[in-house]
Image (spheres, rainbow, N blue to C red):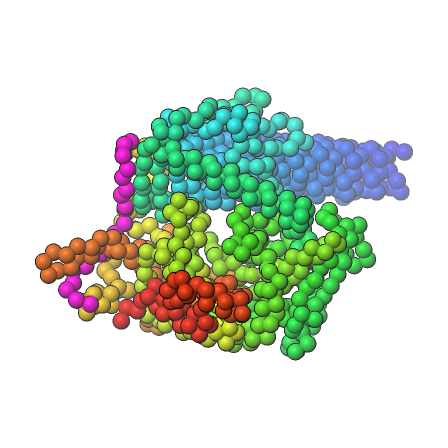
Amino acid sequence: MSLEIFLKGDVYYGDVKGKIPHGKGKYTWSDGTVYEGSWKKGKMTGGGRITWTSGTTFEGEFCGGYLDGFGTLTNPDGSTYIGSWRMNIQHGLGRKQYSNSDVYDGSWKEGVREGSGKYDWCNDDMYIGNWKGGLMCGRGVMKWLNGDLFDGYWLNGYRHGSGVYRFVDGSYYFGTWTKGVKDGRGMFYPGGSIRCPSSKRLGKKKRSIKRSLSDKISINGFFKELGRISSKRISTGGSVREFNTDILSYTSDEGESVDDDVGESLDDKSIVVCEREYIQGVLISERIKNNAGVLYKKEEQRKFHMKEVERKSSLDIFEGHKSSYLMLNLQLGIRYTVGKITPVPMREVRYSDFGEQSRIRMYFPRKGSQLTPSHSSIDFYWKDYCSMVFRNLREMFKLDAADYMMSICGDDGLRELSSQGKSGSLFYLSHDDRFVIKTLKKSELKVLLKMLPSYYKHVHAHDNTLITKFYGLHQITLRVGKKVQFVVMGNMFYTELQIHQRYDLKGSYHGRNTNKDDIEVGTTLKDLDLAYDFHMDKSLRDALFKQIKLDCIFLESQRIIDYSLLLGLHFRAPEHLKSLLEPPDAFHKLQKTLGESKYFYSYYYLELFNNLENYCAFLGPLRHVDHSIPPKGLLLVTHEPSSVNTEPGPHSRGSTLRAFSVGDKEVDLLLPGTARLRVQLGVNMPAHANHKVSHDISGSTEVKLYEVYDVVLYLGIIDILQEYNTRKKIEYAYKSTRHDPISISVADPKFYSKRFFNFLEKVFPSNT
């Protein structure tokens, strides 16, 4: 039955049920807005069309009075959206054409671009890849109008992480980026000197995207199929020009396929390679080589080897079971354990909370049970050791349980690191880089359980401890009996800054160097590879060595050896070289094409001294160097809690450090044009890195030339689960007959601790 109903200036004409709209009808509001379509119990539900007084129209599906389902929104400015909606917000797959003729075709979440999608700018630039919070984030390919192309990782609209930059002239740059600029080491192949292997060797390399909203967007080539990212963010308006224009091109037709096949590689002897190192976009050093075919071959062999390692680790972790099962099992188990222990009221730990017998055990069948959810992995048993102890440790480390679960157990999952440890351990990284998960040997599990009571007391007594922070200890057992133990640790390199170099320092020197041919981006170097010593503020250094001493005493008391200092270096570009920053659209032209050359852009101290006293006198005022020699790239300023992030990190929880150079006040580190960071022990610690370049003697005067860099240090003590047991004593007895006993890594805990401490005093010399 159709009726006309008047209500406070509004008019409805159509089907009713009990004097409320139900069925088909037209509703006109007093402000002129008109809806015509289906109704259910007084609310717009089903198909319909609504026109607002502004001229905006929507035609599609409604539910409960909301735009909900599939529909088309048309605005007066000419912009349109065709796709999925949820409660008046764009959500799901959709295509939006902006008023300036930009077009986005892909996934949406809560009104912003999120997931996989393609964005076409009106000037013919194009991006295909992952989005997060409305910005390019994750894997993606960017094509520029000028013919350049970037294939790699993005963060908040900037190139960030590893990637490949291809120039229109056929040149390639393989390297890393930070916030849109090159940062770290990379390899440049000039156009004409090298070509990518053809599809005959690597298989078909095409990127394609179809117009259908329901089709999957896929990109194959330098990277695998795009993953997905989930996050919350708001904003939908306008064009998305929120990235640093800096790059690339590939051919595209209406079929929208892009082919990177550029032919067979040339003769190895004709290959020219340029090794480059950048710091915040400034070219610091480069080495040019021709006849570099061997280098190129080694790189290709390395890539193949890495693929083999990934294939084996992902397919053979459980005698044929996929590594992805292992990661899923971990997430299921940790979610269950943390969810079970968190509601329990906090209390002091007891003696019974420690030891191998203190554990939670649960069976996770694939079909699920009353206590466990169904899952797509294989049946497994989960064991959580010392749950109350680790719950208290997480509280002590100021880690929120919900954040911990979201970091490890969230939708984005874990990432398996491609390189395995020397012991054969597997490493996983949480999606936000906060936590590292490492597989343990049974002997390491026993050591950790044995030392856990003392470890608990030590970290409770020393907020600034540099020792690895443990967050959980677990074991997965398959029904066939295979067992794998895991420990969850804080990532010492969790920072927004790029870590340019990594060192693992033990204080020994036998076998403690890295083959130069094996060094690549991300390689962790060793003692003999370290060519720097680091000079820092007196108070910062005093605090550092006070804690190192305390940590060494603890490890010695537990008869632990083989531990090391993990040191990460972030180099700052010298301020007077910032003018050399490459513009975003700069082309990389070789300045030389023959032979081999190497040149450094850095600043130097020229020292003239006749004896050690003069040398020490020079080092003393290093903290108070004039701004012009060298220019300050790091500034210590009085700590302001409101200006920095004061949330505890996965590796740090101690107080803000005090600096002698700022009147012994708590300080922040100011990086001009980059960030302001809270200085804590082992985190965001500024220093000067001195590198001796040359040495000459002229008459009675000794001349030394030093490179001096501003660096930010990240450090901590790792690998603390090796006891000095009978096997290690036998190893020491055997090796000491063949090598200098002082040089070998294995040693008595007391000697190991002393050697370790003394070595670090040389790495971080005193300025007084």
Compared to 325, does 334 lie above or below?
below
Query: Residue at left 57%, top 57%?
Result: 438
Q: Is residue 448 visible?
A: yes
Among the 4 quarters of the image, the one containing residue 606: bottom left
Please state if 13 lies on the left or on the right of 211 as rendered. right
Residue 639 appearing in the image: no
Q: Residue furthest top?
A: 254
Report x, y in % for residue 74: 63, 31
- In the image, residue 708 above or below residue 46: below
Residue sticking out furthest to the left: 699
Q: Which residues are magenta?
A: 592-612
Q: Is residue 120 above or below residue 287?
A: above
Please tell me which residue is depicted at 51% across the width and 63% down the height of the picture: 719
| Relative to 598, 308 lies left or right | right
Residue 149 on image: x %, y % = 46, 31
x, y percent for residue 224? 57, 37
Q: What is the quadrant of the N terminus in the image?
A: top right
Would residue 504 be found to the left or right of residue 199 on screen? left
Front-lying residue, 667 or 356: 356
**Nearest to the observer: residue 381 or residue 572:** 381
Query: Measuring 22% from the left and 53% from the top, which residue is drawn there?
Result: 694
Image quarter of the C terminus: bottom left
